[in-house]
Image: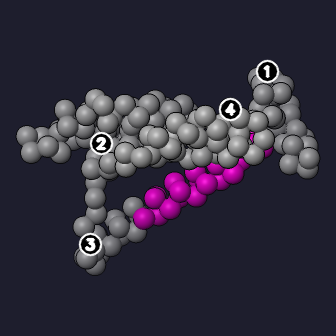
Amino acid sequence: MLFRSLIDDRLGDVFREVGLRTAALNSLPVAMPAVMAMWWIALTVGNAALAHALLRRSGRNFRPWPTLADLELPQWLMAALAIALFGGVMPGVAGFVGVNLTLIFVLAYTLAGLGVAHAATRRWPARSAALTALYVFMFIFGWPALILALIGLAEPWLNLRRRFGDANGI
């Protein structure tokens, strides 16, 4: 496999030093479509937010922009995630599709977790600094995105955004 040999040539020394060479080389090609899709979705969301900010500053924004704290995921996404997780442990194409769909659904739940973070910091005096630190920490280390995904996954049952919201809900 050309892709696997390319990864081995470029990243083999790094993986050997860390001790994850075999596991990383076996899982990276399988998850690459999801990684590319997640980057594409993240870049699209970031570009949309940037475009909205520019339109708002120039006075040409004609549509309201929903806040991230208002993000609600559909009920069926939880069932789809469970099916994708089940498919991810299957061999062959079902496992390949399951792993990739699971990772893409995790991105959706990460955005929901960010919505909880935005709602939780709504009344903080240093809200901008706290959210900036969260985003920087998440992009540098990566693992905080998994914690946010777990928070987003628990949100439908715990109603965290409502608990952090104002008297009118959120």
Q: Earlier in the sequence, mark 4 or mark 1?
A: 1
Q: Are marks 2 and 4 in contact (CB under 8 Å)?
A: no
Three-letter residue code for mark 2: His
**Residue type at numbered disc 4:** Val
Q: Main secondary structure of the magenta part?
A: helix
Residue assigned mark 1? 19
Q: CA distance from mark 3 to mark 1?
A: 51 Å
* Residue 128 pos. (x, y %): 30, 44
Q: Where is mark 2, residue-wise? A: 118
The secondary structure type at the circle numbered 4 is loop
Of the two numbered discs 4 and 3 on the same chain, state the one appearing first in sequence.
3
Residue count near mark 2 (Cα–Cα under 10 Å), binned few <14, some 14–19, many ≥20: many
Amino acid type at image mark 1: Gly
- The answer to whether one can see residue 130 in this image is no
Q: CA distance from mark 4 to mark 3?
A: 43 Å
N-terminal of the pair, mark 3 or mark 1, is: 1
On the rendered structure, is 167 left or right of 70?
left
Report whether residue 102 is seen.
yes
Please, what secondary structure does the residue beneath circle 1 have? loop
Residue located 39% across and 61% down the image: 49
> Which is nearer the N-term, disc 2 or disc 4?
4
Q: Nearer the viewer, residue 152 or 45?
A: 152
Q: Position of residue 134 (x, y in %)?
A: 41, 37
Q: CA distance from mark 3 to mark 2?
A: 21 Å
Q: Which residue is mark 3?
A: 63
Q: Quadrant of residue 129?
A: top left
Task: Write down the region rendered in magenta.
Answer: 28-48
Which residue in the protein does label 4 denote? 89
Can you name the residue that lies furthest to the top here?
A: 19
